[in-house]
Amino acid sequence: MHTLSAMKVGESATIQAFHVDTGFQYRLNGLGLRIGKTFELIRRAPFNGPLHLRIGSTELMLRKQDAQMIEVLM
C-alpha cells in the first residue's frame, strides 16, 4: 500500500481509498479528491509542511498527516 504522503515531487498517482472519517472524506471530495481520480504532486513545503497537488486544472494544498490517510496507486 502506498500513501499520498510517500510520493515524490513530479509523480502522478490515482486515489484508491480514504482512511478518514466520513465528514473529512466529503470535504476532500468537494476539493476534487475522489476515488479513481489521478493527480500530480507538484511540490512539498519545507519542514514537513503541506503537499501541493494538481488535479486537472485545480491545485490545492494538503497537510502531510491527512495525506498519510489517502491510499494511492502509483
Image (cartoon, grey):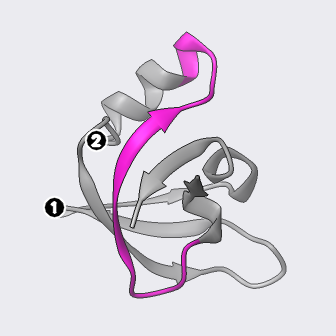
Residue at 39% in and 81% down: 11
Residue holding disc 1 = 56
Q: Nearer the viewer, residue 3 or 21?
A: 3
- Residue type marked 1: Gly
Q: Residue drawn 35% across and 64% down?
A: 13
State which tag comes first along the sequence, 2 or 1: 2
Query: What residue is drawn where x is 41% and y is 66%?
Result: 53
Residue 66 lies in magenta, yes or no? Answer: no
Q: Quadrant of residue 20?
A: top right
SS at circle 2: loop
**Quadrant of image for the C terminus:** bottom left
User: Label 1: few (<14), some or many (≥20) within 10 Å?
Assistant: few
- In the picture provided, is 47 more to the left or to the right than 15? right
Magenta range: 7-24
How busy is the neighbourhood of tag 2: few (under 14 within 10 Å), some, or many (20 plus)?
some
> Residue 42 is drawn in which quadrant?
bottom left
The verdict on residue 12 being magenta is yes
Identify the secondary structure beneath mark 1: loop
Residue found 75% across the figure and 85% down from its top: 46
Compute the Cα span from label 2 to label 1.
9 Å
Residue 25, percent from left and from top: 48, 24
According to the picture, the residue beneath numbered tag 2 turns out to be: 32
Position above or below: 8 against 27: below
- The extreme top residue here reads 22
Asked if marks 2 and 1 touch (Cβ < 8 Å), the reply is: yes
Most extreme residue toward the front is: 1
Could you say which is closer to the camera, residue 68 or residue 61? 68
Please tell me how many numbered marks the rendered image carries: 2
